[in-house]
Every structure is written in structure tokens, then in C-alpha cells.
Amino acid sequence: MTLTPKTQQKPKVAVYKFSSCDGCQLSLLNLEDELLDLAAAVDISYFLEATRTVKPGPYDVGIVEGSITTPHEAERIKEVRQQCKFLIALGTCATAGGIQALRNFASAGEYAKTVYAHPEYLEYLETSTSIPENVPVDLVIWGCPVNKNMALEAIAALLQNRRPRFPPSPVCLECKRNGTICVVVSQGIPCLGPVVHGGCGALCPASGRGCYGCFGPSSVANFNALVQGMQPRDRYPNETATLLRSFSSAAPAFKTAAELAYKLGANPASAHGGKETL
Amino acid sequence: MNTIEVPALARVEGEGGLYIGLKDGKAVEIRLDIYEPPRFFEGFLVGRYLQEVPDITARICGICPVAYQMSSVAALEKALEAEISPQVYALRRLMYCGEYIESHALHVYLLQAPDLLGQPSALDLAAIAPQVVKDALRMKKIGNAILKGIGGRSVHPVNACVGGFYRWPEAAPLKALLPELEWGLEAAQATVKWAVTLPYPELELDYEFVALHHPQEYAVMNGEVWSSKGSQLSVSEFETRYLEEHVKHSNALHGYTKDGGHYLVGPLARLALNHAQLLPAAQKALADNQIKLPITNPYKSLIARAVELVQAYEEAIQIVKAYAPNGPAHLELKLKAGEGSGASEAPRGLLYHRYKIDAQGLVQFAKIVPPTAQNLPRIEQDLLALVPQIVAMPQEQATLTAEHLVRSYDPCISCATHFLKLKIENRE
């Protein structure tokens, strides 16, 4: 779509929050050097975290943070879709259900009892689902949190009527480009880098730890090979499995890979072998 | 006054609603409804390995992830009886300085100041006072730069672990921040000077202040839990006096003391209990601007945040100058079954965690008491005290004044939010 219509009106942008930590919206406010220019280039019509001003829809661009975890949210996202010509799912909650999708592998009711004295007061769904599982989405931006420059690039590309340029390769290649020594090869630490979307800049290996997958599964990756390569290196029970079952756990590729890792972990031949603690 | 409805309370973190029921010009019911969907963190922490805990709890709040990381590592280190090195402690303090700077600059200028200057947002403020907003963003950016320098990114940084840090951050990028930090210190001092001139609504309240206290330092990650009513407890005794209740209208639990009282955590409480431990520039900011303590007007917590900005820049400069990493960045942990509690002062107030772990380091039980949950009943009490003023006001002003009160708490509704809906209903 194009955001440069014949009239000179600035495109109207709306930012919404669903179940989330606010961190991806905050990443927009963390564009300290660009925020005022951005606010001049678009019409920020709905962004509750930033402004009381609410201009009526429809909007040219909707940016959605968070996942769908309540009956109310499941209805509200449909209204949001109707209001927005171009809809962006921002961050791993919106693109894969987020950390709260761990409920999908257990009973949300049991969790509710753990946390709340009166679970009957709560309204929630049994699963946390991504935005694309609920309504059609025009662009997804992974990350927990997103890389703020990718969010900016998405908006800039829309303004210029072109495709956004996102990092094309997985975290593993970002390490190579940065000259970071591989934590798997040099220290035997399990790392999801080979199968995870690039974009973070390979921060975890640069800090001497394995990638924990907050940017979600790469579209081109061999998940079986990853699990078979990493799982024997587990330093605590089910390390590889729980790395996969964390921030992007409900993404189908991670879901299947985690199941394989748990299966291998249950096999005593490859189980936790008294290695150094982390 | 008839029913007032504001479809959304903006410039807070999270989703909630506000209901005020009136009869004969008096409030008969006040509820801060918290709609923020529950995410069940304490449920899914069970079974996870202890090193995953700081990464997972960070996701409770994108605005104060460091607070969640620091309270969780403190609790887990206590469970393992692991003593971190002074260097690790200093670097954790520096991370916390970064978070105070980022969070307080955001709240002071982008979230609360628009109320005091009659603007719907800081973006609108930028149209009439561009330099104020540019300086605010520059101040905030320095906090984020500290977090990036230590943890790779400002939201959910990746370097902190139980026992210390995965790796010492490089010194050069942190030292390179010194000129900006020096600028930030001056900007923060100017912020205090400006903050005391703003037109705050009048409201004086009798608070029980609760915060960490330490005799030698402005307590953020160390010390005992002190109350202005005289209670002095170790962190491990926190739950003997501070309790939580699940009320029907809120997906966040409500905190209260064991004798049924409401208490206040956050910048006003810290300043009231710990002003003697502030560093010299922050002390000077208090004296030069004739700030009398304790501050008991909730709207004026902006002033307390401004003073803490001075403190955070001043402390960050000290730590960055002294930073010379040597020795291991983290302890080699000796796993054992145990239980430990930990607390730290998030920008919004005291954040308490307690964990039980087994001999393999897997979490068996987790309890998290966020600052906003402790403050929710207090906010309701403040609104009750505000009602006599609101009923005499025109609707728009009444609404704004009530909203502003809630915003002045910097409530983190993600730690509890959707939107805050203000509804004042006349039951006559």
C-alpha cells in the first residue's frame, strides 16, 4: 500500500496495547533522536501511552503490541483490524503469543490458582494467541523487545512506498559479522542462534551466553539438527528445551523443536551430566 | 454532577478503570478497576531453572525490567547463600541508575508534565516548548545508553545473571558517556528547579511511607524494609507485615499492612525515609529549592522524581569513573535446595520477590509483590480525599484532576494496564 496519497494529509497512525509488558511501545518512545521528526511526518492519532488525544478512525496504519488472552481482547482486535488499513504486529507477543503463551502448554486455571486467591474473579482465555492467529496482518516485526530501528524502518518504508529492509539472516550470522567468538564451539554452551531471526545484533553471544530466541524462529532453519546438536550440551535439565519454550514458545517451529528436545532429555543416555553450573 | 466518563486514561503503563460513586455530593464508592489481563508469571516460573528467572521476570514490565531482574537475582542469591562481589554490586547499581534515569525522565516530562502544562501529550508540548522536550529526550536517552552499555539493550537487557553478570561490559563505551552524564546532572538540577514552580493541585495526605533503608547509601538494592510508622524489618520478614488481597475489581492484587492500613511506596516514601543518604548534589538540590520533607501531596511526586534524577546521574558518574573490571564477572554457583527473598526499589517503589528452589536449581515456588499492587489501595484512598474538590469543579476539570492524580503515581499497570476508564456516577 502507499501512504502518500494525492492529498497532502499525513497518514494517521494508531498504536494499541494488548497482553504485554509495554516494552515494544516503549521502544517507539525510545526513538529519542527520531521521535519528534516521526511525530511531524505522521499523525499520531491514537497512542494512549503517549497522549490523551484520541482522533477517530479509520487509521492508515495500526501498530499492535501484545497477544490475545481474554475474551474482550479477542473481540477488540477485530475492531482494530476494521479500523486500520495496514496492520503491523509489533514484537513477539503479537507475532507468537509471547511469554504468556506458556499457559498453552499447561492449564491456565492451575496458573490462576497459583497466583490469585479468587480465580473466579478473572476473565481469561485458556491460550495466548498471536495477532495473525486472530486477524489478517500486513507485517510482522519480531523481537522481545523489538529492535526500535526495525519499527522505525517499517514506518519509513510505508511512507516511502517500499518494502521494509529487515536483517535477512539468523542471529548466528550476526555473530559472524560482529566477530563474536561462537559460544557453542568455544564453551559448549547451548545457543539458538542458528535458528532465530536476526535483528537483535546477537546480543547474548556477545555477552558470553547462548541466544534464548526472543526474536522467534527464522524462516529458513533446520530445527531438528539444532536440537540434536545442542541438547547433548545441556547444563541443567532440559536447557535446550526450555530455551525453545520461552519467549516464542507458541511459534509452531519452536513448539515442535521443544517437543523433540524434551524427548531427548528424557533419554538417560543424553541426560544432564553433572557439568559445571551456569 | 451527573455521570462523567473518560473513555481512556492515557500516559500510564497498562489498562484500568476508575469508578467514583457519589451520593449527596459525597463519595460512597471508589474503585480503581484493573483490566490488564493476568499473565500468571508466578505460575509458569515453577519448574524453570534459576538462571532463567531474571530473563522471564524482566518481561513483567518493559519500563522497569532491571528492577525485576535485580529483585529476582537478590532473592535467588539469598536462597543459595551466595555473596556477590562489591564490583558486581556497583555495576548493578549503575544499571539501576540507568533505569531510574530512563523511567523518571519519561514520567516527569512525557507522562506527568503535560497535565501541569495543560497539554494532551509531550508531543503537543514540543510544539510550544521544543527545547524542553528535546532536553527531556536527551536526558532519557542517557539512561538507555547506560543500560545498553551494560546489557546490550535498554528494554530487557541480557547481561545480568544470578551471581553477577555473564560478562563484564567494556569500560570504554561506558566512560565515553561521562560528558553526557555531566550534562545530564546539570539538566536534572534544572529539572528540580523547574519542578518546584509547577502549579500542583492542592492535596495533603497522611501517608505511611514504606521503603528500603540503608544507613550508608540511598537504598535501592540493599537494606531493611522501613516504615514511617516505625516498623523496621529485614527483607526476609517482609511478608509478616505486608499482605496482599485479591479484590473483585482488579486483576492486580491489593497490598495492605497486617493491621489493615494502606501504605505508600515509591519516590515520596524513599525521599521521606532516606533523604539523609542522598549524595551531595541531590542534597544541594533539596536545600537550594527549599524542598520540605516529607512531601505529602501525591501530585508533587514529580519533584521527588526530579531529585532522584539528580541522585541517579550523580551516582552514575561516580560508578562509571571508578569502573575498572577485574576478577570473575559472576560467581560459580553451588546449587542447593533453599528459599530466599529479595527486594529492590523499582522506580515506582519497593519490589519484593521470594523463591523456593530444589537441589537442581529448579524453581518450586515464586511470589512477586510489585510496587503498583501495593499502591493501588492507597490511590483509592487519595481519590476519596480528592472527591470534595472534584464535585465542586466543572466536569472536564474534575476528570483531569482525578486522572492526573492516578498518573502522578506512575502506575505500572502492566505490572497491572489496558486503559483507565474514569466514571463518576451520581447515585442521587
Image: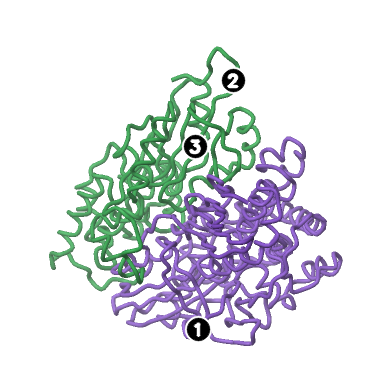
Q: Chain of mark 1?
A: B
Q: Which shade is chain B?
A: purple
Q: Toward the viewer: B31 or B283?
A: B31
Shade of chain A as shown in the rendered figure: green
Characterize the local packing of mark 3: few (<14), some (14-19) or many (20 or more) Cα atoms within 10 angstroms.
many
Residue at the image position 37 percent from the left and 46 percent from the top: A73
Residue extending furthest toward the top: A6
Q: Is label 3 on the same chain as label 1?
A: no
**Residue annotated with mark 2:** A9
Q: Amino acid at mark 1?
A: Lys
- For label 3, the SS is helix
Residue that mark 1 sits on: B258
Residue B110 visible from this viewpoint: yes
B50 lies above or below A74: below
Inter-mark Cα distance, 3 to 1? 47 Å
Chain name for mark 3: A
Residue B155, horizontal then vertical, whole percent: 51, 52
Q: Amino acid at mark 2?
A: Gln
